[in-house]
Image (spheres, rainbow, N blue to C red):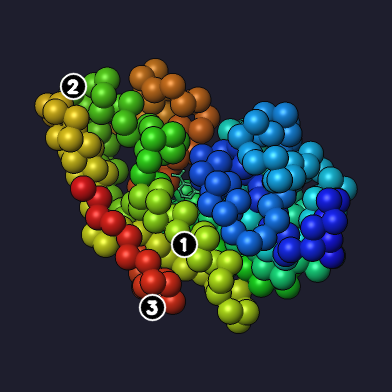
Amino acid sequence: MPNADGDDRPTILLTGGTGYVGGRLIPLLERRPSSLRCLARDPETLRPRVRPTTEVVPGDVLDRPSLGRALQGVHTAYYLVHLMSGAGSKDFERADRQAASNFAEAASQSGVRRIVYLGGLGDDSDPDLSPHLHSRHEVGAILRDSGVETIEFRAAMVIGAGSLSFELMRSLTDRLPVMLCPRWLTTPTQPIAVDDVLSYLLAALDLPPGGSRIFEIGAPEVVSYGDLIRVYARHRGLRRWLISVPILTPYLSGLWLALVTPASFEVGRHLIEGLKNPMVVRDRAALDVFPIRPMGVE
Ligand SMILES: NC(=O)c1ccc[n+]([C@@H]2O[C@H](COP(=O)([O-])OP(=O)(O)OC[C@H]3O[C@@H](n4cnc5c(N)ncnc54)[C@H](OP(=O)(O)O)[C@@H]3O)[C@@H](O)[C@H]2O)c1
């Protein structure tokens, strides 16, 4: 269906365009032979960052009617939203559930062919899975349940300037010569460079139709958070001492983060709670399906 400008190329809808991952995806999608529409709560903040040919429409994933309009005539819809840092951060799980249900229903009713979602790694069967990671998986399940083919990528920390989880690690390492670190220092994780995430998100456009899939993505090697801090410090020429303190609770860790980093206390605490959960690639199907070979942590 042609969009408002009479353009009849397939339309891609991007949510989260003002965010870290979505913002970096915009110029790449603009080079595709499709027309791009971005949904934003505040379109004026996004308009200067997109080409004149890119549509920016007002919308809020918590406002169901706004989604019907945004998804009209859309072929593929990117869901790159989380509500952790929004007004409802105290109850982000409920808000994320509602938002995903709204989006899933609107996408299904609008005849969207594919949803592409970036969520988090982590083992669904782990009874200790943090509320944040549990919620990321739940969002994927809700999108799949819409009946619209959903391609879910699951990633650990996305490495790149501006990525919240990376910036937390960076501010800690930059500011503290000696760190009292709880057990999570040794948790295994498989972070991924933002360029590799973007390659996967783009490649999802070209997958042949074939039902919903979950792809776990990450760097080739498994490291610990302590390793990440040491690698980063070495590259910055910083000498850092990490001292393991087994009794630092997620609450205290979050409080401590709030004191030494610019990220808000709530967001930091939600992310910290997930640091106890291994975030490693167990299913390597992404390496078979996509010609992408993620770069190493160094
Ligand atoms: N960064 C990482 O390290 C990382 C790692 C693994 C997975 N992921 C996943 O990647 C996805 C994107 O993450 P990110 O780091 O790019 O997040 P981000 O920078 O915090 O951006 C979040 C986006 O969500 C939008 N948003 C929030 N509430 C909304 C609402 N009610 N309606 C419409 N849009 C709303 C924000 O728009 P406003 O400008 O309106 O607030 C913003 O564009 C998330 O699913 C996240 O779980 C990220």
Q: Please report whichever mark, 2 or 3, sits nearer to the chain's N-terminal start.
A: 2
The answer to whether residue 188 is above or below residue 178 is below
Q: Which residue is mark 3?
A: 288
Of labels 2 and 3, the one closer to you:
3
C-alpha distance separating marks 3 and 1: 12 Å
Where residue 66 sits in the image (x, y, percent)?
A: 84, 45
Q: Secondary structure at mark 2?
A: loop
Q: Give the amino acid at mark 3.
A: Asp
Relative depth, front residue between 150 and 92: 150
| Ligand number 1: quarter of image | top right
Kindly check if marks 3 and 1 are in contact, taking CB atoms under 8 A apart as contact.
no
Residue in view at x 50 percent, y 25 percent: 264
C-alpha distance separating marks 2 and 3: 42 Å
Residue in view at x 58 percent, y 67 percent: 205
Q: Give the amino acid at mark 1.
A: Tyr
Of labels 2 and 1, the one closer to you:
1
Q: Which residue is mark 1?
A: 200
In this rendering, position of residue 268 left or right of residue 53: left
Kindly check if marks 2 and 3 are in contact, taking CB atoms under 8 A apart as contact.
no
Q: Please report whichever mark, 2 or 1, sits nearer to the chain's N-terminal start.
A: 2
